[in-house]
Amino acid sequence: MEKIAFLGLGHMGEPMARQLLLAGHPLSVWNRTPEKADALVSAGATAAAGPADAVREADVVITMLAGPDAVREVADAVVPALRPGAYWVEMSTVGPEAVRELAGRVPDGVTLVDAPVMGSTDKAAEGRLGILAGGDAAGVEHVLARFGPVTRTGALGSGAALKLVVNTAVIGGVALVAEAMKLADALGLDEATARSALAAGPLGGAVARAFATDVHFGSDLAVKDVSLATEVAQLPAMEAVLRHFQAAAADPDVVHEDIARAVTHIRARRDS
């Protein structure tokens, strides 16, 4: 079994790392907040003192971090410690430009794969995420399959690109549901009736996500993802969505809460 280093034990990373432990992989873990590794260490993982210590003996390195800046910071530490023959699987949502930047930094003999995921914390805990794998992923596809079905998306960076497309659609759909419910509020409609009607139409999936209670994707992460998308192409509708989530993320009670909380925030705004 490959020795695996898993860096980033947030809402998604911790249950994903647990899937590797359940599969029997020797696992070294690191997180900026060390206490987040405690439960995994109790289950058999080894806590590393820092990113470089985590990856030094690893056959496979997996990063699941908050965004491009966090990945760059970790790369500063791990690139000199990666051993020849290792795979680095970048699973954060960072966009293809950040992946290309990493590709220019990995040493000879190290294979970089971008493999962001579709799904939230519930699917991470069940090993049912969708994996979007770009680049030469053949050597680690069996590892990625521990997290859920793997879709090979093409060249390096294509997984990160497709993840932006998917997240943009999801976040935009949630914002559209929020605005539709705001209109229902303004028209004096019964909330349950309006919500049921929307759920029965083409926005059914977005309605379910807008009112979800058992998953987590923070409004701050939504801002990061939509910002990445609107830097790549002119997306007027998504620029309006971005303003919604920026306003939600400016509220300290909402910023790190699931985007379902942002729906309530959008409905309550008077200047939108």
Image (spheres, rainbow, N blue to C red):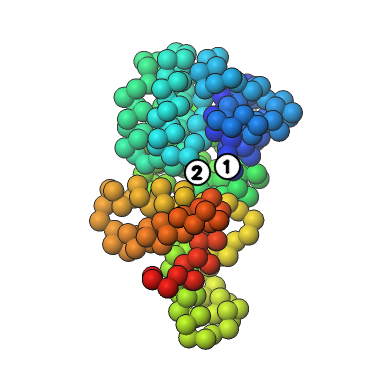
Q: Is residue 184 visible?
A: yes
Label 2 crowd (10 A; few <14 / some 14-19 / many >=20): many
Question: At label 2, which amino acid type do we have?
Answer: Val
Q: Position of residue 210 (x, y in %)?
A: 53, 64
Q: Is residue 148 visible?
A: no
Q: How many marks?
A: 2
- Give the residue drawn at x 45%, y 55%: 250
Label 1 crowd (10 A; few <14 / some 14-19 / many >=20): many
- Give the residue drawn at x 58%, y 27%: 30
- Give the residue drawn at x 42%, y 19%: 79
- Mark toward the viewer: 1 or 2: 1
Quadrant of res 80: top left
Question: At label 1, which amino acid type do we have?
Answer: Met
The disc label shown at residue 117, or none: 2
Question: On the rendered image, what quadrant is the N terminus found in?
Answer: top right
Determine whether 33 is above or below 180 in the image. above
- Give the residue drawn at x 43%, y 39%: 67
Residue on which disc 1 sits: 12
Distance between mark 1 and mark 2 Cα atoms: 10 Å
Q: Position of residue 193 (x, y in %)?
A: 58, 81
Q: Nearer the viewer, residue 220 or 213?
A: 220
Marks 1/2 in contact by CB < 8 Å: the verdict is yes
Q: Nearer the viewer, residue 19 or 65?
A: 65
**Left/right of residue 193 with respect to residue 239 in the rendered view:** right
Q: Can you name the residue that lies furthest to the left here?
A: 234
N-terminal-most mark, 1 or 2: 1
